[in-house]
Amino acid sequence: MVTYEYGNPHAVITLIQPVDDHDIAGMDAEVAEIQRLSGKDFRLLAVKVDSWNQDLSPWPALAVFGKDDFGNGARETLTEILELCKDEDKVYCLGGYSLAALFSLWAAYQTDRFAGIAAASPSIWFPGFVDYMKSHASRCSNIYLSLGDKEEKTRNAVMSQVGDCIRDGYAWLKEHGIYCTLEWNKGGHFKEPELRTARAFARLLK
């Protein structure tokens, strides 16, 4: 697993984000936007995953677009990420976009290592995920959620549930004492992912 480092390597706050090649192309813009919005000193580790649908999925599921089914590699990916979080003097936040945001949400139920979770446009339509949230306790008390206001207007029957799923999950987290924000962005899923992710991390830092 290759890791790219941005920001101040000596900062107390470390942001961790699973990424693919497309994300890496936008990382400089994302980091600059986090700095602009938060005014905070931070280090960001972009962890490149080999197989998006395999490495970030909490359990197997059939493909909902394209031909790639979802695997169950999230636990192994989280184990590797936690190896980057061993310094007890540092504060760690985990986040990402789309399936990486879903992975980050799932990670909140596996470990108390993260001070905040930044889930920008998470794939919370993932089969069984909201039920999973309701049958387990989050171990992170600060969670940011966002969604584009056109994301639920897709013709894909599974993915069109994303709006209802995020409203349901957000209400559940709030009801159970989690400090949680839900922000609505303009546009569909593919609009300005690096800026949406930057807003998610910046909100945690504030």
Image (cartoon, rainbow, N blue to C red):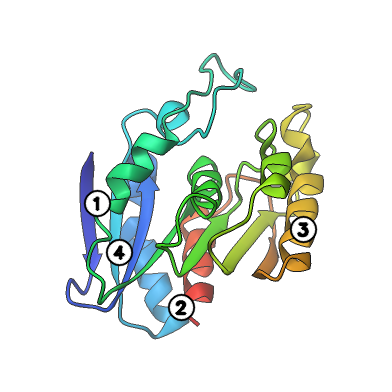
Q: Residue at x 52, y 40 (%)?
A: 99
Image position, residue 65 (x, y; %): 62, 22
Q: Which residue is mark 3?
A: 172
Dots 1, 3 in contact, CB < 8 A: no
Mark 1 or mark 2: which comes first in sequence? 1
Helix, strand or loop for disc 2: helix
Residue at the bottom extreme, as displayed: 39
Asked which quadrant contains residue 33, the reply is bottom left
Disc 3 crowd rating (10 Å Cα; few below 14, some 14-19, many 20+) is some
Marks 2 & 3, CB-CB < 8 Å contact = no
Identify the image quadrant of the N terminus: top left
For marks 4 and 1, the one nearer the N-term is: 4
* Residue at x 63%, y 60% (from the top left corner): 145
Mark 3: which amino acid? Trp
Q: Residues within 10 Å of mark 2 (few under 14, many from 20)?
A: many
Label 4 sits on what residue type? Leu
Residue beneath the point at 66% across and 69% down: 178
Distance between the Cα atoms at labels 4 and 3? 30 Å
Q: Residue at x 17, y 76 (%)?
A: 10
Name the one closer to the observer, 167 or 26: 167
| Label 1 to label 2: alpha-carbon separation | 22 Å
Label 4 sits on residue:
44
Q: Quadrant location of residue 2? A: top left
Q: CA distance from mark 2 to mark 3?
A: 23 Å
Q: Earlier in the sequence, mark 1 or mark 3?
A: 1
Residue 198: image x %, image y %?
47, 65
For disc 2, the marked residue is 205
Position above or below: 75 against 109? above
Number of marks in the image?
Answer: 4
* Residue designated by label 1: 83
